[in-house]
Image (cartoon, rainbow, N blue to C red):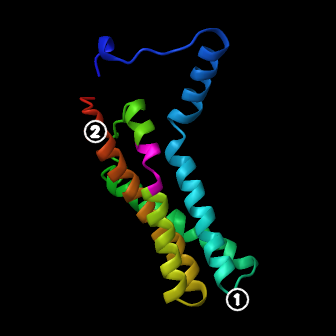
Amino acid sequence: MAEQERPQKHGSGFFRLFEQGVDTATRNNVTAYGYSVSITAAFAILQTSRSDTGIFEIFFAIGAVVAFAIIAGLASGFFREALEDQPSNVKSLAGALSIFSVGLALGVAYLVGIVLEGWAAWLVSAFSTTIIYIVGVGLELVVAHRMLRSDE
């Protein structure tokens, strides 16, 4: 978006500072926040729906880490390409749409918990929750980008 086309900020004094603070707090944290909600709720879904929950199930995070590494590797040409960032208004709109990525990720966690037993359920749930969330965010960013017709 060209500099002259940027929306005007509203408010002054305290309210302007507050607006800037909220913008700064959310601009680059929106996807991390959504992922934190997704993976935490996925654990809760499995924990409350199963009788095999113990201390070792915390290591279900291994599935999440592996999935995150695979997606990051694929997206960056196996870490050889620098990726461009999205404009902050695109990230903000995509964050507003994140109910879809979070909802899909939690739906997958629930389904995995029904279908699989034991450790496999925990690892596959974390892995699939992560994959679905990241793919969902990617799609939300595409939608936001198109809705805002961002040229950046």
Crowding near the residue tagged with mark 1, few <14, some 14–19, many ≥20 C-alpha atoms within 10 Å: few
Q: Quadrant of the C terminus?
A: top left
Magenta span: predominant SS is helix
Q: Name which residue type carries label 1.
A: Ser
- Residue occupying the point 48% across, 71% down: 107
- Residue occupying the point 33% across, 57% down: 74
Q: Earlier in the sequence, mark 2 or mark 1?
A: 1
Q: Residue 42, image x and y in percent? A: 58, 69
Q: Which contiguous range is marked in magenta? A: 94-99
- Image vertical order of residue 36 relative to residue 44, above or below: above
Determine whether the residue tagged by mark 1 lies in a helix, strand or loop. Answer: loop
Q: Nearer the viewer, residue 66 or 48?
A: 48
- Image vertical order of residue 86 relative to residue 110, above or below: above
Q: Quadrant of the N terminus?
A: top left
Corner quadrant of residue 3 = top left
Q: Residue 36, image x and y in percent? A: 59, 55
The reply to whether the C-beta atoms of the residues labelled 2 and 1 are less than 8 Å apart is no
- Image vertical order of residue 25 relative to residue 111, above or below: above
Front of the two marks 2 and 1: 2
Q: Is residue 95 magenta?
A: yes
Q: Is residue 81 magenta?
A: no
Q: Which mark is residue 51?
A: 1
- Asked if residue 22 shows in the view, the reply is yes
Count of labels in the image: 2
- In the rendered image, which residue does mark 2 sit on? 147
Q: Residue 145, image x and y in percent? A: 30, 39
Q: Which mark is residue 4?
A: none
